[in-house]
Amino acid sequence: MRAPEGWPIVGWAAAGIAAMLGSIFALEGTAHESVLLAVRWTARTSVALFSLAFLASSLHRAWPSRTSAWLLRNRRQVGVSFAASHLTHLLVLLAYCGWTMQGLLAAAGLPTLILGGVGYAFLLAMTATSFDRTAAWLGPARWRRLHTAGVYYLWLVFFLTFAFRATQSLLYASLAGVLIAVLAFRLLGPSTLQRIRSAGAASAGARS
């Protein structure tokens, strides 16, 4: 089966998230604990989609392939799929908190609420400017500044969310570790692999 291209990717991602939530509620019911499970799983789908969009360029530079070329070509749509997942996460989180600001504040705390609120503001701005017309209206330089600041801020929000809970669960500690690895690869991976390849080629040339 050929991988989808362009904006249908967002539809497939949204359908997958909806199917996941449907399965959770069908199997577990709609009790408070089931909604909490939905909160956790939408957080995980958000991290996965965010990481793919975050690493698209680095992965293609490090390991050029049909898969990495597909990811780079559709990075914008993967990013919007992440937005769909994370907005769904917000909705199920609000449902878990009783659809009240007081409940959200009690569950998350004021610092987390502020940190996450700024993250969602970045997410909405980045999503709104992920289309040709809005990106052209913003201009290349401002678009680049917005999206660069946004992805690193969102990385920070995800990392702090999991790092502060790392002592509670091995899963949270593992996710924090994965995010560190994702950031390290984005910043250092392609250039490090290029140096290793160059050193290997030089060594092979010296032996021949």
Image: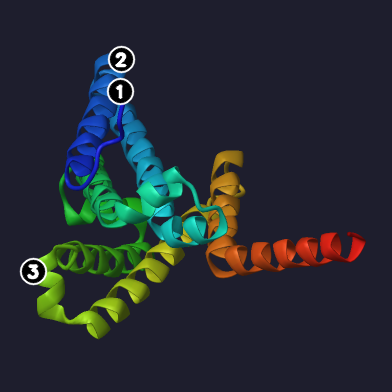
- Direction from residue 128 to residue 206 in the image, left or right: right
Disc assigned to residue 160? none
Q: Would residue 55 be visible to someone looking at this image?
A: yes
Residue at 16% over, 68% down: 129
Question: In which quadrant is the C terminus drawn?
Answer: bottom right
Q: Quadrant of the N terminus?
A: top left
Write down the residue under mark 1: 24
Q: Nearer the viewer, residue 202 or 151?
A: 202
Crowding at dot 2, Cα within 10 Å, few <14 / some 14-19 / many 20+, comes out as: few
Disc 3 from disc 2: Cα separation? 43 Å
Q: Residue at x 22, y 35 (%)?
A: 12
Q: Amino acid at mark 2?
A: Leu
In the rendering, at what x and y percent does residue 147 appear? Answer: 30, 72
The residue at which mark 2 appears reads as 27
Relative to 51, residue 40 above or below: above
Residue 133 is marked as 3
Most foreground residue, 74 or 199: 199
Does dot 2 land on a helix, a strand or a loop?
helix
Q: Where in the figure is residue 96, as x and y percent of width and height?
A: 25, 40
Secondary element under disc 1, as helix, strand or loop, is helix
Q: Are marks 3 and 2 in contact (CB under 8 Å)?
A: no
In-front residue for pair 45/8? 8
Applied colour scheme: rainbow
Q: Along the polypeptide, which appears first: circle 3 or circle 2?
A: 2
- The kind of residue on which mark 1 rests is Ile
Give the residue type at disc 3: Arg
Tell me how many marks there are: 3
| Cα–Cα gap, marks 1 and 3 | 38 Å
Q: Are marks 2 and 1 in contact (CB under 8 Å)?
A: yes
